[in-house]
Image (tube, helix red, strand yellow):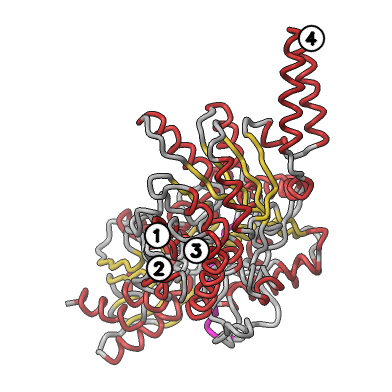
Amino acid sequence: MKVLPTVKTPADLRNIKRELLPTLCEEIRQEIIQTTSKNGGHLGSSLGAVEIITALHYVFDTPKDKLVFDTGHQAYAHKLLTGRQSKFHSIRTKGGLSGFPKRSESKYDDFGVGHASTALSAALGMAIARDQKKSDARVVALVADGALTGGMSYEAMQNAGLLGSDMLVILNDNQMFISKRVGALGKVLTKLLTKKYVQLAEEKAAGFLKQFDELGNNAAKLAKRARSILFPGTIFEEMGFRYFGPVNGNDIEAMIEVLESVKEVKGPVLLHVVTKKGKGYTPAEEKPTKFHGIGIFDADTGDTIGKSSCITFTKAFSDTMVKLAKNDKKINAITAAMPEGTGLDEFRHTYPERFFDVGIAEEHAATFAAGLAAEGMKPVVAVYSSFAQRCYDQIVHDIALQNLPVVFALDRAGLVGEDGPTHHGAYDLSFLRSTPNLIIAAPADENELQHMLKTGLDSGKPFVLRYPRGSGFGIKMDEEPQDLPIGKGVWLRKGNDLTIVAVGNRVHPALEAAELLKKKGVDAGVINARFVKPLDTDILEQALKGSPRIVTVEDNSLCGGFGSAVAEYLTAQEKPFKLLRLGLPDEFVEHGKVNLLFEQLGLTPQTMTEQILKWGK
């Protein structure tokens, strides 16, 4: 008889005999592997965290006790143990479970999260709220090691140490971030030693020395400083945390025992747990980066299934970066813990001295690039669109204000699909368009991307290149990238009844819509705008001369996006016009396959055609 089906809630879990827990963990792993093979998802990190999550729900009284995840991609076991087994097959599908913790989905999801380095701040807020309400609930934050490369984690830690409120932070150290672990912190974590007896010795020594008043206090401080050299784990204790570990996080018995012990310790506590990413599934253990976030795959072999034959936008970016850097030694590439995801792994391999992975630290990546640019280099910062939100101030203050030539390559712009609202790049045009000095470009296809990247690097200006996730449109790539005229769009077809002005990956669907409209008796022109800023006002004037009816199409929020830019210009001209703006609504778009989401939002050729016909009546 299987154990997992008997666990409907964590309360059921706490009634299971401890000797059955290893079996339960194995069943959880198999469920995660089988479901992820059909739906795609974050596999490696979720497999590594099975015992930690099981032990947490076994030892703590959830949902009274609060469990906060960092990033959330390790939370699949959490969903299986908190009443969502029957729906787990639907994870990351349209209308199904989210791939991340989500407050509206379950009372056990105490904080919604998709980005890193947020758990400590949220957990501290919950701990202080608990204290003010005089509750006895416990607060636990489960933090992956990569999250500690983000500065927000340290802001929270120093505040937690100052406030001294009871909270437990579990550092899940799998010796990986998404890709290979980088930075000084990674070296510190590998040196940490179990310090139970060292802590006891320190406390006794400090108590003895303090008997000698000022001299004793100074001696105690000196001893503590010396200890910090011998035991680098005290970086956490210097910030006000009691440190325990490291502990084998894939040993369910060890995890339960240590959690039972540390949950009674007062004040901020950090428990260092070591796990193996992809634990229990050989392909994921051998290739943890590939299986961090993966599409559909064969569960028996680990081979991916159903890849498109078209080159992806990311691949086009990757190839162009390597090609351009061959003849331009000033080109540097920077990413925030995503070399494979952004396509910079090939650049890293070819030009390692000009490649920089700064860890999950987008703010630092931006200002680091500004420093390179200030000294004559040509830095390219490749991050996901939704992660660029995290360095907005640096883009404004450190780059645009100083007019420094940094190129931002914003991958995953627009809808990303199954990862959902935490990862949709729906707002970059809106939050960047108001920034002076920025040039903002959006290629229609993979071939245009290579030309825009060269244009950005040659522009000598702050330049944003935003492009979508996934395969391109099968466009033949030109032999060499060429500079494009900045701020100039191109006519793809002329029309007498209206003009569709499209940008980015909605250009080719707009062309298809124009063909469908022609069959309905509507003669529609199509413009590839190419640039959102500066806006090509000349081509808009040409369109108005043909017809006052303009349709804008984008895969960004309609609030402040490309259509808003066109509306602002047309309104200021005091000329008659009729405008239809198609794009993403003023709401968070849920997860699902991209083609289904575009259909739902009216951004496929057929649904665009239907909206335009309805608008024209």
Q: Amino acid at mark 1?
A: Asp
Residue density around tag 4, few if under 14, some if 14–19, many if 20 or more, within 10 Å:
few
In the rendered image, which residue does mark 1 sit on? 12
Q: Is 472 contained in the magenta span?
A: yes
Residue 109 shows which numbered tag?
Answer: none
- The Cα–Cα distance between marks 4 and 3, rounded to whole angstroms, is 52 Å
Tell me the element at label 3.
Answer: helix
Residue density around tag 3, few if under 14, some if 14–19, many if 20 or more, within 10 Å:
many
Query: Is 459 located above or below residue 245 in the figure?
Result: below
Query: Is 93 located above or below residue 426 in the figure?
Result: below
In the rendered image, which residue does mark 4 sit on? 215
Residue 77 shows which numbered tag?
Answer: 3
Q: Do residues under tags 1 and 2 come within 8 Å of each other at their CB atoms?
A: yes
Tell me the element at label 4.
Answer: helix
In which quadrant of the rendered image does the C terminus lie? Answer: bottom left
Say which label, 1 or 2, has the lower sequence index: 2
In the rendered image, which residue does mark 2 sit on? 6
Which label sits in the foreground, 1 or 4?
Answer: 1
Is residue 450 visible in the rendered structure shown here? no
Query: Is 64 located above or below residue 433 in the figure?
Result: above
Say which label, 3 or 2, has the lower sequence index: 2
Q: Do residues under tags 1 and 3 come within 8 Å of each other at their CB atoms?
A: no
Say which label, 4 or 3, has the lower sequence index: 3
Q: Amino acid at mark 3?
A: Ala
- The Cα–Cα distance between marks 1 and 2, rounded to whole angstroms, is 7 Å
- The Cα–Cα distance between marks 1 and 4, rounded to whole angstroms, is 56 Å
